[in-house]
Image (cartoon, grey):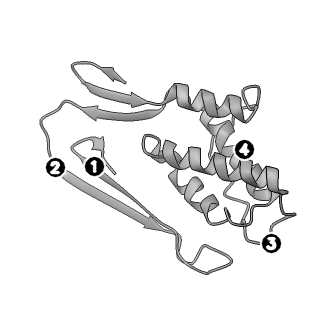
Amino acid sequence: MACSKQGINICQRKYVLDILHDACMLGSKPVCTPIDYGVRLHQQSSTPLDDIEASSYQRLIGHLIYLTNTRPNITYAVQHLTQFVAHPSSAYQQADYRILKYLKAALGFGLFFSASKIFQLKAFSDSDWAGCIDTRQSITGYLVYLGSSLIS
């Protein structure tokens, strides 16, 4: 966290570095997007993980869910992968690793809460309309701003 006259910047850089270290991904090549939008994951995407790998996958998803509090740019990708926590496979694990590679490229990203006196509330939403191959449910995302600061 850094405070200035412009506002407060919240960044979880050390937490991201700890996650990358635990996953042995510090030496990985960074990518510019958290998810490969050309790949459609579904429940029969690939071979299931063994118990040890599945446990590691589930723990990593938990870390990423916590990280979405200050990194809303990974929320869609993490939410998409949480659908497969009960039966993880190698394709989901590769998608997890892609999020980590993206985080490596954007270590300093976080939330900035402006010190401005503008308190206008703005909200935006988006949906992919039945984007889940397995359930045909929509995945909806939203952003809520107070002034120029993202609050949800």
- For the residue pair 17 and 40, the one nearer the viewer reads as 17
Question: Which numbered dot is residue 97?
Answer: 4
Indicate the secondary structure of the residue bearing disc 3.
Answer: loop
Q: Give the residue pinned by disc 1.
A: 145
Residue occupying the point 43% across, 45% down? 69
Badge 3 or badge 4: first in the primary sequence: 3
Quadrant of residue 26 in the image? top right
Badge 2 or badge 1: first in the primary sequence: 2
Residue occupying the point 66% across, 57% down? 37
Residue occupying the point 52% across, 75% down? 138
| Distance in Å between CA atoms under marks 4 and 1 | 30 Å
| Distance in Å between CA atoms under marks 2 and 3 | 45 Å
- For the residue pair 106 and 91, the one nearer the viewer reads as 91
| Distance in Å between CA atoms under marks 4 and 2 | 38 Å
Quadrant of residue 141 in the image? bottom left
Badge 2 or badge 3: first in the primary sequence: 3
Badge 4 or badge 2: first in the primary sequence: 4
Badge 3 or badge 1: first in the primary sequence: 3
Above or below, 92 against 64 in this view is: below
| Distance in Å between CA atoms under marks 2 and 1 | 8 Å
